[in-house]
Amino acid sequence: MTYGHHYFDADIENPEMFLVYPSHSGFKQAIPHSFDFPIQGEKTLKLWVVPFVISDNDVEKGVQWPENTNAETWTKVT
């Protein structure tokens, strides 16, 4: 959270961050909502919590992104 509050450029209109945790039996899908925190005046930092699946199956493995994020754009930037 400190990173998001301090390092997001003022030019970023919709700042989003992701906490990535290993998946397990009780955490197989991303939390479907963000945790929103006010930053830089009227902007809101969206924090998403997502699982990372380790698997031999190419379809299942990797980060399980929530459907209502800008994750596709975000992953291209980083």
Image (tube, grey):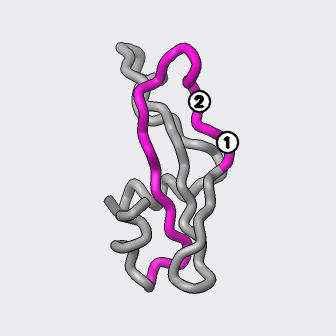
Task: Give the left or right position of residue 42, taking residue 62 as reference.
Answer: right
| In the image, residue 2 lies in the stretch drawn in magenta | no
Q: Secondary structure at mark 1?
A: loop
> Magenta residues?
11-33
Main SS of residues in magenta:
loop
Q: Nearer the viewer, residue 62 or 28?
A: 28
For residue 21, the mark is none
Residue found at x 64% / y 45%: 67
SS at badge 2: loop
Q: Write down the quadrant of residue 53 in the picture.
A: top left
The residue at the point 47 percent across, 24 percent down is 23
Q: Which residue is mark 1?
A: 32
Q: Tag 2: residue type? A: Gln
Q: Pick whichever, 16 or 4, lies toward us.
A: 4
Task: List x then y, in percent, for residue 51.
Answer: 48, 32
Is there CB contact under 8 Å for labels 1 and 2?
yes
At label 1, counting other C-alpha atoms closer than 10 Å, the crowd grade (few under 14, some 14-19, many 20 or more) is few
Is 61 above or below relative to 48? above
Q: Which residue is mark 2?
A: 29
Mark 2 surroundings within 10 Å by alpha-carbon count, few (fewer than 14), some (14 through 19), many (20 or more)? some
Is 16 in the magenta?
yes
x 41%, y 16%: residue: 57
Q: Amino acid at mark 1?
A: Pro
